[in-house]
Image (cartoon, grey):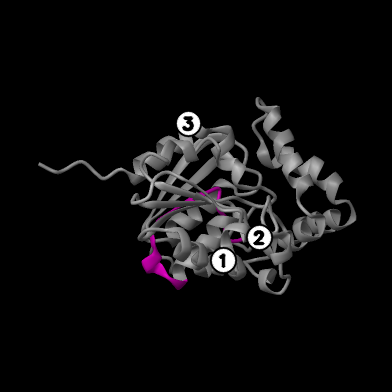
Amino acid sequence: MNLTVRNNVKIHGGDGLPTMIMAHGFGCDQSMWRHLAPEFASRYRVVLFDLVGSGNSDLAAYDRQKYGSLQGYADDLLELIDAFATGPVIFVGHSVSATIGVLASNLAPEKFASQIMVGPSPRYIDDDPYRGGFSEEDIADLLDTMEANYLGWSSTMAPAIMGAPDQPQLGEELTNSFCRTDPAIAKHFARVTFLSDHRADFSRSRTPALILQCSDDLIAPVEVGEFMHHAMPDSTLVMIANHGHCPHLSAPDASIAAMQAFLSPPPPTA
């Protein structure tokens, strides 16, 4: 199988550099990394790709059985690392792709140097005392609305997910991205994403991780970041003052600064 075509792989930066792989969230594509990727291409071989079923990936490769769980995407990620990476990778995952990265790194920890999680959530549904941000009824209503009117759902939800009220063009961009996604695939991916519970997988992760959490996020409330930070023994939690779920678009400078601080070696001790 041609992985370059399957996942629309694009590579920035020279050979011989450490590899950074960036994976987008639900309803998005690799263009969402346009502010971050150039900042790191001088230090890393930056690999961008589209999840199968998203962006300009090969839609013929979408298999409902394989992608009936997030593990199917994690298996793809491991294939991409083997094909395009040099040494253990720095994996940057937005939203659901952060979970995909955890599943992959738990299977093959030797392939990962670290993970950077942007707005991650191991579970979206409240489970007392855990707060995921949604009740079971909320998620059922969300999925039912998607089934009944996907384009209408997209035009309502995308701006709310993006947030950034002072940058309305970003909400329009996310709406257009959602609307470009094949509705049948989007509905299936949404069920897999919003009904999943990967808290135990996050707790098993031993890969050094940076958790980038927004101070006001409809999809992943502050409590989610705090839960993951306590659950993951080698994690750093950074709170970004941002309204929305996509700080790599709406607060790129703060996101880049947090990533650079995490990736920079500590100063030598006297």
Q: Is 21 left or right of 162, judged from the image as shown?
A: left
First in sequence: mark 2 vs mark 1: 2
Number of other residues with Cα within 10 Å of mark 3, as a class: few under 14, some 14 to 19, many 20 or more: some
Q: Position of residue 72 (x, y in %)?
A: 61, 69
Disc number placed over residue 253 in the picture, else none? 3
Q: Which mark is residue 218?
A: none
Q: Check whether the beta carbons of the residues at disc 2 and disc 1 lie within 8 A of each other.
A: yes
The crowd level at tag 1 (other Cα within 10 Å; few <14, some 14-19, many 20+) is some
Q: Along the line of sight, which residue is nearer the eye, 12 or 90?
A: 12
Q: Which residue is mark 2?
A: 52
Q: Amino acid at mark 2?
A: Val
Distance, label 3 to label 2, CA atoms, is 29 Å
- Looking at the image, residue 66 sits to the left or right of residue 185; the answer is left
Q: For the residues marked 2 and 1, what is the alpha-carbon distance in whole angstroms?
A: 9 Å
Q: Residue lying farthest top?
A: 166
Give the quadrant of residue 194: bottom right
Q: Secondary structure at mark 2?
A: loop
Looking at the image, can residue 254 be seen?
Answer: yes
The verdict on residue 169 being magenta is: no
In the rendering, which numbered label is found on residue 76? Answer: 1
What are the residue bounds of the magenta stretch?
107-126
- Residue, x 55% and y 60% (percent of image)? 99
Q: Determine whether label 3 and label 1 are within 8 Å by CB.
A: no
